[in-house]
Image (tube, rainbow, N blue to C red):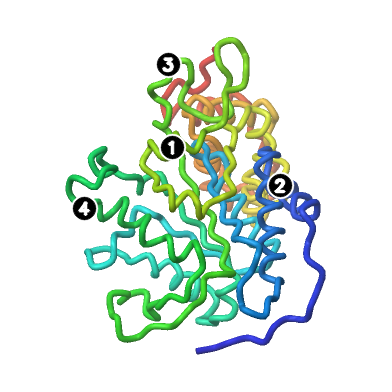
Amino acid sequence: MKTSPRVAEKSLPTPREIVAYLDRHVIGQERAKRTVAIAAYNHLKRCEQKTAAGKRLIKKSNLLLIGPTGCGKTHVARTLAEFLDVPFAIADATEYTEAGYYGKDVEVMIAELLHKCGQDVQEAQRGIVFIDEVDKIARRTHSARTGAGARDIGGEGVQQGLLKLLEGREVFVPQNLTQHWNKHDFTVVDTQDILFIASGTFTDLRLYQESRAVGFGQANADGRRLPPITEKELLDYGLLAEFLGRLPVRVELDPLSEDDLFQILTVPSDSVVREYQALLKTDGVDLRFEDKALHEVVQFSLRRKTGARTLRALVEEICHEVMFEAPERRGETIVIDAETACARLARLGEGAGARD
């Protein structure tokens, strides 16, 4: 098994430096970026803390991100890993089951992280694991809260299995991802320096509250900002107290506004618009978008309530004809206006081009 020597000592990035990098790649979510930056900084300080007994006073700063689909939860975590230059693995919580049942054991998510860094154990032990859809592993029956009922192998059982990973333990990690059920070939990995970031939409968390719309960071009818999600609400939803205790840093992400979505399309260096302009530039075509056309894309996304998740698919639909004809239109400048955008989006239905 490969190991890499410790890199030369260097100063830790400050929360302000982390936020500055996130600002260049992540639009909006100011509070979430600050919270993630502070948690990452504290995690790095913890990793640097040396004690004679091998115990650390500073506890792990694992995070729980709560927000609607398409608001940037995964993007924030991935961008953080890029800045810190550490391995990054995404795990879907719904794929895992309690140990001994058909499905993936929780140790497989560490195996995926180990695979990302070429089986380098030391490198993997400083990585980030992003656990998505964590709301889907809540207890599924009310009776399970009192210990009654059938075993919840894909819900409470997974939460129980994750406790040792989140807290920081030496675990036996399968070397072969395609045969992870094989218990013979494994590697010992210490998870105490691995940062875990869990996320979920929790879309039906407050359906019983008539005054609150499904979503996050919204306001009541009287215009006041809704209170943050409480520990009790998460417990009632079906998350274990021990599980929440190992995710001490929690932040709610806001739905992306119209201005946020417009900036996502245009501002970042890897934005969707820049991507398609670069793609057509290879065919000698100069592609341009009118602002009104991009606002049509944004409005369509808002009506679908999908956030930034579908922006690329919408731009793909708009550019479909252009990309097909691009080799024969070398040297031309093609401008996508609002009328063209509406006509293309109308193929997808749901009232494209309609005005409120």
Furthest toward the front, the residue is: 53
Residue 340 visible here: no
In the displayed structure, 248 sits above or below 214; it is: below
Q: Earlier in the sequence, mark 4 or mark 3?
A: 4
- Residue 334 falls left or right of residue 118: right
Residue under numbered circle 2: 268
Residue under numbered circle 3: 210
Residue under numbered circle 1: 202
CA gap between label 1 and label 2 equals 28 Å
Residue 174 placement: quadrant:
bottom left
Which mark is nearer the camera, 4 or 3? 4
Residue kind at label 3, given as amino acid type: Glu
CA gap between label 3 and label 2 equals 38 Å
Q: Earlier in the sequence, mark 2 or mark 4?
A: 4
CA gap between label 3 and label 1 equals 16 Å
Residue under numbered circle 4: 151
Residue kind at label 2, given as amino acid type: Pro
Q: How many residues crowd around disc 2 within 10 Å: few (fewer than 14), some, or many (20 or more)?
A: some
Label 1 residue SS: loop
Q: How many residues crowd around disc 4 within 10 Å: few (fewer than 14), some, or many (20 or more)?
A: some
Q: Earlier in the sequence, mark 1 or mark 4?
A: 4
Q: Earlier in the sequence, mark 1 or mark 2?
A: 1
